[in-house]
Image (cartoon, grey):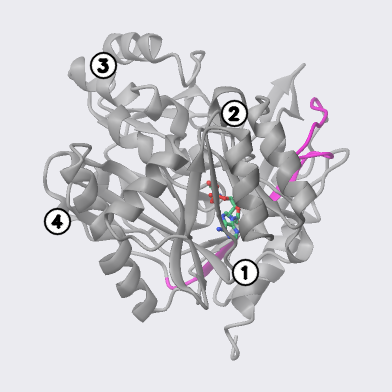
Amino acid sequence: MKVLIVGNGGREHALAWKVKQSPLVKKIYSAKGNAGIWQIAEKVNISPTDVKALVDFARREEIDLTIVGPEQPLSEGIVDAFEEAGLKIFGHRKDASILEASKVYAKNFMKKYNIPTAFYETFDNEKKAIEFVKKVGTPIVIKADGLAAGKGVIIAYTQEEAVNTIKDMFAGKFGEASKRIVIEEFLEGEEASYIAMVKDNKLIPMATSQDHKRVFDYDKGPNTGGMGAYSPTPIITQEIEKHIIEKIMYPTLEGMIKEGKALSGFLYAGLMIGAKGINVLEFNVRMGDPETQPIMRRLESDLVEHILDILEGNIDRVKPKWSDKYSIGVVLASKGYPNSYEIGKEIKGIQEAEKDKDIVVFHSGTDIKDGKLVTAGGRVLTVTAVGETLTKAKEKVYQAVEKIHFEGMHYRTDIGDKGLKYLKAD
Ligand code: AMP
Ligand code: GLY
């Protein structure tokens, strides 16, 4: 089989790495990918959002299966276009992708179908939004409606901050994405990621995981796309998982069918687990980045076979096999990320780090310039390790991180600690 993977990040490298292990797969193509993916896949010089060119390419090359990593191509209708052309693709159609593409839609959907989420109001004008904030007080969470690369959510701790954020958003800070906003109750607790492969009203859970969204240790600093993740997370116990499936995942699948927007692809519920129960912070219509990296390290069965079964209507046959080990992924970022950063810094030490068979380094923003591996994004690499315990996985991953270097490299040193708190005997 020929498989095309759409997307440029660490998530896509981890997917490509897993796809490569499938005996069904002869060749992998990557649009556009990064320097890590190009080691195992042929580079296709088409942007992930150039849907028409991707359809033409897939037709011409007779691609048997396309897997979409990021949300933008999904919400621009890549799946609809591939299906129209008779090409097999795993991901949600444009209408269903609105669950991630519009926070206003997602919140109203959750309210309609009794899916637990923070109390909220939606606004399309500054005055009413400011009045609301003055009435309910801070801390409060302000979210741009549309896709904003993980940056459209601001937690305002003071009224001044809230008012300034509202003004910035309506002044077009995120362009069209912040023409409408959601203002919602601030929830406390532990965040966790729950991801499943879904089709219509059925789902196959992926291993549990927990992301670390803030840029600095102990959850300090601004939100990022994610600075590290581990799997499984003890925060999602079997009992909690049952609750998530029954009260969140199935009602979501069934609600979307009722809305005429049946889901088909990866579905990610970002959860807050705390005194107010288990609430959905957001839905993503894709896998998480960096969650995918540690999750793929633990998947022992064949991802391609699972996806084909789902697409062919045989989801009941899909029985993923997960390793008993823990895995951790630590993101190495450019100086300045999640704000502006420089690129083009030479990266060294990956081969050295990967001498340990428990280590795999996934690339995010990397490129080749003048024959050298260089940084090309805010998040540059995700170093992953597996270990018998979370403690061992953590030790290993940070030993490997120390072998890698690029100018301005920064990373969190506490990835996994949130889980360790719950694992007394580990
Ligand atoms: P979202 O894109 O909606 O998941 O928001 C990004 C991040 O903002 C989440 O991962 C949380 O860390 C934080 N966040 C979002 N909504 C809330 C909320 N209602 N209460 C507390 N933190 C939140
Ligand atoms: N790691 C969070 C996300 O992918 O949205």
| 216 with respect to 314 (left or right) | right
Residue at the image point whose x is 58% and y is 72% from the top = 189
| 157 with respect to 1 (left or right) | right
- The disc labelled 2 sits on which kind of residue? Asn
- The disc placed on residue 62 is 3
Who comes first in sequence, dot 4 or dot 2? 2
Q: CA distance from mark 2 to mark 1?
A: 26 Å
Q: Within 10 Å of the Cα at label 2, are there few (<14), some (14-19), or many (20+) other Cα atoms? A: many
- The disc placed on residue 34 is 2
Is mark 2 in CB contact (under 8 Å) with mark 1?
no
Who comes first in sequence, dot 1 or dot 4? 4
- The disc labelled 1 sits on which kind of residue? Ala
- The disc labelled 4 sits on which kind of residue? Arg
Residue at the image point whose x is 48% and y is 13% from the top = 46
Q: Within 10 Å of the Cα at label 1, are there few (<14), some (14-19), or many (20+) other Cα atoms? A: many
Compare residues 330 and 255 and report the one nearer the observer: 255
Which of the 4 image quarters holds residue 205?
A: bottom left
- The disc placed on residue 317 is 4
Compare residues 336 and 115 and report the one nearer the observer: 115
| Label 4 beta carbon within 8 A of ligand 2 | no
Residue tagged 1: 393
Q: CA distance from mark 1 to mark 4?
A: 32 Å
Compare residues 9 and 140 and report the one nearer the observer: 140
In the rendered structure, which segment of residues is drawn in magenta? Answer: 324-344
